[in-house]
Image (cartoon, rainbow, N blue to C red):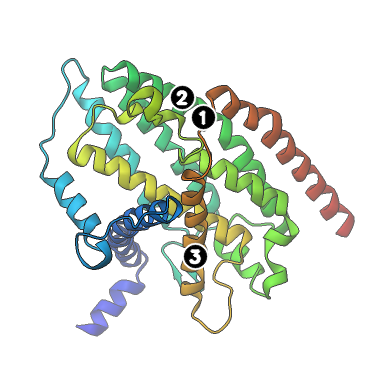
Amino acid sequence: MIEQLTVWLTHPLGHMIAALAAIMAFLGVNGLVLVYMERKVAGFIQRRPGPYEVGPQGLLQPVADAGKLISKQLTTPDGADKLMFWAAPVLSMAPVVICFLPIPFSPLLTGMDVNLGLLLILAFSGLNSLALCLAGWGSNNKYSLLGAARAVAQAVAYEIPLLLAVLAVAFQTGSLNLSVIAEEQSRGLLSWNVFTHPLAFFIFFVAAVAETNRSPFDLPEAESELTAGFHTEYSGMGFGIFFLAEYSYMVIVCAVATALFLGGWDGPVLPGIWWFLAKVFGLIFVMMWFRWTFPRVRFDQLLNICWKWLIPLGLLNLVVTALMLKLVR
């Protein structure tokens, strides 16, 4: 039995199925952990305890919230396009599983080692803006439609500096394989790309915060202006899937940043996977810190930051990187 299982796992199809099952389990646990972490970070910054009633230190509060969402009735608004309305949360969550496959958690733990893994992640993560567009258009709600329009404009703008930052690292390593890029940085702290490409790391992280619709760039769901934006009409697990997808995309962009700039699994003493996860959750903590520290920008400011600052800086960084590589080689 064990031998048959080993043979099945070594087969490419079996390995992929096992990887998909592990990713879905990780996403479920990760959602609970990040909800608890977000509330505790918010409480700490606002000088209050955060969740502490349900379970020891409030550990079971995310489980109670998940149970509440699962038990709620699923409703469709009057006049809404039912197909588009319910396709949106599914389309928002479906690419997440694909995006996790090329991420190298350690030298021996990668769901699917492909040469174009970075391109795969950038391509499939872009489908999230289409899901938000469907949610806004299919809801038959003015606030939802405005939120969807903002989401599309924001995604189109911030994907450009994100790609420019990624290209700078790809130029240096000569590969779009995240495992190869992480391996190139495993020669110690000073070999990490964050020291050779600090500007690219800054551009990537700011663009990633905007791509995941996190504060201060959460314009598509600005509750002070649009009630809840694109998911105004969603309740129960419709809202829950959008919520889980947002946290999943946070993990994806932070994992990509770790592999590109922070040495991937590189670190002393502990196994590589623990270092990788520590760096990922460290970046997620910074994103949460941003949410509870900085005020939300206006929409015109959001686009000005991208078109007037991030894109020119990204192009400059890319040109300088290309020239330096040409001189060295």
Circle 1 sits on which residue?
A: 154
- Which mark is first along the chain, 3 or 1? 3
* Residue drawn 30% across the image and 66% down it: 18
* Marks 1 and 2 close (CB-CB < 8 Å): yes
Q: Is residue 167 above or below residue 30?
A: above
- For marks 1 and 2, give the CA distance: 6 Å
Circle 2 sits on which residue?
A: 150
- Which mark is first along the chain, 3 or 2? 3
* Marks 1 and 3 close (CB-CB < 8 Å): no
Q: Mark 2 belongs to which amino acid?
A: Arg
Q: Residue furthest front?
A: 47
- For marks 2 and 3, give the CA distance: 33 Å
Q: Mark 3 belongs to which amino acid?
A: Pro
Is residue 120 in sight in this rendering? no
Q: SS for tag 1? A: helix
> Dot 2, crowdedness within 10 Å: few (<14), some or many (≥20)?
many
Circle 3 sits on which residue?
A: 104
Direction from residue 182 to residue 41 in the image, left or right = left
Q: Position of residue 42 (x, y in %)?
A: 40, 51
Q: Is residue 301 above or below residue 54?
A: above
Residue 146 or residue 222, whichever sits in front: 222
